[in-house]
Amino acid sequence: MTSILKQVEKDMNSLIDAWVADYELQPGQLFVIGCSTSEVAGKQIGTAGSEDIAAVIYKSLTKLREQTGIRLVFQCCEHLNRALVMERQTMEENRLEAVYVIPVPEAGGSMASFAYKQLKDPVVVETVQAHAGIDIGETMIGMQLKPVAVPLRFAVKQIGNARLNGALTRPKRIGGARAVYA
């Protein structure tokens, strides 16, 4: 387990460095994280969750939050219909509504469960429209992003053994050929 934790830390640090250097994130923007710690460990999604792996990922994401001012939002697994864990302040600022559930590794996933335990005043909401996010292990965060998602390409292709995808969103372009966007 120690070697995978070191690899995850290395991969996450590279990813965070890339986000900060290459992609602009604004303070207050919602940043959704979908993560299968089972996939990170090299197992099938939902079969070998690990809060130890979640802890390493969470630590790196905390650095990203501190450097950019984003609001972290952790997607639960399908057993909680991909609901999201966040700070109550984030929920209130975004006029979202809480649902009553506490994620646990077996229903919510290890990442969301771990995050819930770390947050100062955690709540769970059903859905968001995030400005950006990462998907570690193909957990399908697309439903949590604003309508026009732009896929990102990172030098880091995996976190541990899990495939990595990322996205930023942009406003819809309207008006056709005569419209000016710049």
Image (cartoon, rainbow, N blue to C red):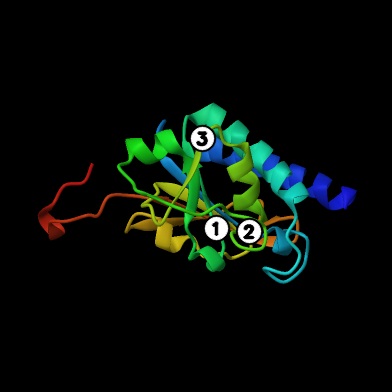
Give the x, y percent position of residue 60. Answer: 66, 38
Residue 149 placement: quadrant: bottom left
122 and 115: which one is in front?
A: 122
Marks 1 and 2, Cα distance to the nearest angstrom? 6 Å
Residue 155 in sight: no
Can residue 113 be seen in the rendering of this structure? yes
Q: Residue under circle 1?
A: 76
Q: Which residue is mark 3?
A: 121
Asked if residue 50 is positioned above or below residue 27 in the image, the reply reads below
The amino acid pointed to by label 3 is Asp
Q: Are marks 3 and 1 in contact (CB under 8 Å)?
A: no
Question: Could you say whether the residue bearing mark 1 is in a helix, strand or loop?
Answer: loop
Name which residue lies at 48% across and 52% down.
84
So how many labels did they put on this image?
Answer: 3
The quarter of the picture where residue 48 lies is bottom right
Q: Nearer the viewer, mark 3 or mark 1?
A: 3
Determine whether the residue tagged by mark 3 lies in a helix, strand or loop: loop
Q: Which residue is mark 2?
A: 109
Q: Locate residue 67: give its quadrant.
A: top right
